Image (cartoon, helix red, strand yellow):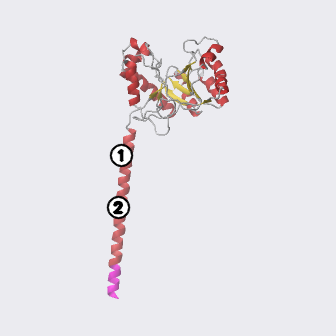
Amino acid sequence: MRLSIQMILRTSIGFAAVLVFCSLFAVGARAASLNSYAAYVNATSSLSVFDAGETSPDALIPGETPGRDTESNKKIVYLTFDDGPSENTDAILSILRQNHIHATFFVSGMYPQYRHLIKKAYDEGNTIGLHTETHKYDIYRSEDTYFNDLNQIAQIVKSEIGFVPAYVRFPGGSSNTVSRNYAQGIMGKLAAELNKRGYQYYDWNADSTDAAHSEDAVDDLVKHATDCNDNNVVLLCHDAPGKGTTVQALQRIIDNYRSRGYTFRGISRNSYAPHQPIAN
């Protein structure tokens, strides 16, 4: 009987030792896991401002350039508005809501009193892209001056919607020639560097001409804006002071394309990204 008790005691002590060992192992494993997670958080949080969020498919991801260079078979119009937000943004958003469609806003920092409309446009389901903070053409003096300016609007947008979008439009488009006044060959360098950083730039294959002809009659803007029969239409419009005729033309532009079987979307990672021939 005494032997049995000793055996029981030994067995109990051994079992207890195993429990202690397992507990220590579990604590160590959890600590290791927490350390690994902490290392992950530290690594991801130290990424540059050009990778600002994992919460949206539109967010910048270094090394993962969005966009496609071929059109889809579906008939889609991508309404795009440059230069805002401005005094006209609310009116544009109202028309989009009434038609249950979305567009893309390539925003700048030119009119800070309307900055809150970036978030409003995003919250209503529209896509936000970057157009540079100042929209001054002397940003084409060098890669540094361009990206410094782009970084400023990136941070403004991040403060409004929580991340930096991966979508960019050059002031004047990638085919602009005004950049020659500041640096020869700069546009090709910027286009390549944008892609390296995970951005995609979007030109257009349809133009409302409201940039150069903001005082044109509404009929003329509608005619220019709807003069495209491609499957994927990326239409250039402007959201800036003095573009009231663009707002007046917008409903007719929407009606025209709808009558031809088109739907409307905001730009996404899989959208067609038209590139015009780079001229500098």
Residue 150 visible, this orientation: yes
Q: Is residue 2 magenta?
A: yes
Q: CA distance from mark 1 to mark 2?
A: 21 Å
Residue behind mark 1: 39
Task: Give the residue displayed 36% in from the left and 45% down from the top.
Answer: 39
Q: Is residue 258 left or right of residue 159?
A: right
Estimate how packed mark 1 is, as few (under 14), some (14 to 19) or many (20 or more) residues with alpha carbons within 10 Å.
few
Callout 1: SS: helix
Q: What is the quadrant of residue 186 in the picture?
A: top left
- Overall secondary structure of the magenta section: helix
Which amino acid does the dot numbered 1 rest on? Ala
Along the line of sight, the residue nearer the viewer: 33 or 217: 217
Q: Above or below — where is 35 with respect to 4?
A: above
Callout 2: SS: helix
* Stretch in magenta: 1-9
User: Residue 25: which numbered mark, if any?
Assistant: 2
Q: Position of residue 150 (x, y in %)?
A: 43, 24
Q: Position of residue 59 (x, y in %)?
A: 47, 35
Task: Give the residue displayed 54% in from the left and 15% down from the top.
Answer: 211
